[in-house]
């Protein structure tokens, strides 16, 4: 299944994908997948683990098509689905194919979305579910992602990483008082694990947004939307808005926190060195190290090159 944005004004095609499948010999796929991506001028990050594949890639339309065709030629990935969006320039510096213990790291043994998972809810039905007074709505993303946008009324667990989510759930006994629990994330993969975890913890009426925030922003008209703000994405676009248009945010390359246009005008923001979120907690040694890195980036720009160190 392919979810495509009809917007060819932006030259770069971005494909987000994940697929849970038993993959005991996943290591042998690393080199050929990287080779196919490099041959087709495709960049991004793909994670391989015994539970499947996850990642985002970007490049020319034909190149992305060739990479996806290759992936689906692997029998275990025959049912691979992906979502498409557009970018004004390629939002990755290089191609990485990494071997991992999990394709999305929760750190809880025995959680398998192929065996038990929550009920999928399509974007067109999401508003009704989360508007129901009997539903508790939980954002499964990290605090810096939630900071720039979330669904109206959603609970922010204020986690720094997905590994903290299970302990947070276990500390929230009161969520069991609501008949229904709805969860969402960027593209859907974290909710596969999160809903499987809640089912293992004994919760029954667990729901998650099919295709994540990205599919909701693609399909639900802005005037009908219950989404507030922008959606953080893990590439150089930093954020996207309704219609998957590139958002207004930039990234602090010192602390990796997304910045609003207002924050970028702060006296504490120095490109590549600091921002309002990290200025007061940064040591002078770190500040000097980031200054030197930024100097190298600017020198590369002047040479018409891209610094990828």
Image (cartoon, rainbow, N blue to C red):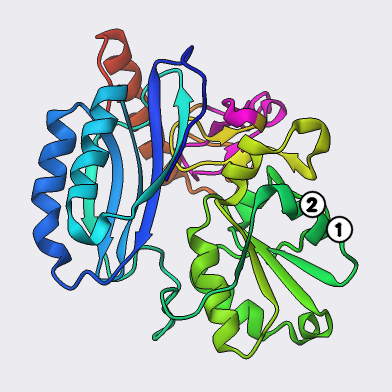
The stretch in magenta equals 243-270
Image position, residue 257 (x, y; %): 56, 43
Q: CA distance from mark 2 to mark 1?
A: 6 Å
Where does label 1 land, which residue? 131
Quadrant in the picture for residue 158 = bottom right
Q: Is residue 102 magenta?
A: no
29 over 259 or under it: above or below: below
Position of 117 compared to 230: left or right?
A: left
26 over 112 or under it: above or below: above
Extreme right residue here? 133
Where does label 2 land, which residue? 127
For the residue pair 143 and 63, the one nearer the viewer reads as: 63
Quadrant in the picture for residue 89 = top left
Quadrant in the picture for residue 176 = bottom right
Q: Is residue 294 visible?
A: yes
Residue at point 18%, 49% (across, down): 73
- Which quadrant of the rendered structure holds the C terminus? top left
SS for callout 1: helix
SS for callout 2: helix
For the residue pair 147 and 182, the one nearer the viewer reads as: 182
Position of 79 compared to 142: left or right?
A: left
Q: Is residue 161 visible?
A: no
Residue at point 55%, 72% (across, down): 194
Image position, residue 253 (x, y; %): 45, 37
Image position, residue 66 (x, y; %): 21, 33
93 over 205 or under it: above or below: above
Residue at point 76%, 32% (across, down): 222
- Count of labels in the image: 2
Q: Are marks 2 and 1 in contact (CB under 8 Å)?
A: yes
Position of 255 compared to 82: left or right?
A: right
């Amino acid at each position: 299944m392919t979810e495509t944005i009809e917007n060819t004004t932006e030259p770069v095609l971005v494909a987000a994908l994940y697929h849970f499948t038993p993959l005991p010999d996943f290591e042998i796929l690393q080199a050929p997948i990287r080779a196919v991506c490099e041959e087709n001028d495709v960049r991004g990050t793909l994670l391989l683990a015994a539970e499947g594949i996850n990642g985002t890639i970007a490049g020319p339309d034909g190149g992305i098509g060739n990479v996806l065709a290759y992936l689906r030629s692997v029998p275990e990935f025959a049912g691979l689905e992906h979502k498409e969006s557009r970018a004004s320039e390629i939002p990755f510096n290089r191609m990485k194919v990494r071997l991992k213990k999990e394709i999305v790291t929760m750190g809880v043994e025995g959680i398998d979305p192929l065996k038990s998972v929550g009920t999928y809810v399509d974007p067109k039905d999401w508003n009704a579910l989360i508007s129901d007074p009997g539903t508790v709505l939980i954002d499964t993303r990290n605090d810096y992602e939630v900071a720039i946008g979330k669904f109206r009324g959603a609970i922010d667990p204020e986690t720094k990483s997905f590994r903290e989510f299970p302990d947070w759930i276990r500390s929230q006994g009161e969520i069991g008082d609501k008949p229904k629990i709805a969860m969402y994330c960027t593209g859907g993969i974290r909710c596969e694990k999160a809903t499987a975890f809640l089912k293992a913890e004994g919760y029954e009426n667990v729901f998650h947004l099919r295709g994540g925030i990205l599919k909701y922003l693609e399909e639900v008209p802005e005037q009908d939307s219950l989404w507030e703000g922008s959606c953080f994405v893990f590439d150089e676009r930093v954020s996207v808005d309704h219609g998957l248009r590139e958002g207004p945010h930039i990234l602090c390359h010192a602390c990796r926190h997304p910045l609003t246009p207002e924050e970028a005008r702060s006296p504490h923001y120095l490109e590549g060195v600091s921002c309002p979120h990290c200025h007061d907690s940064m040591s002078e040694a770190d500040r000097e190290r980031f200054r030197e890195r930024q100097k190298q980036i600017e020198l590369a720009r002047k040479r018409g090159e891209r610094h990828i160190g």
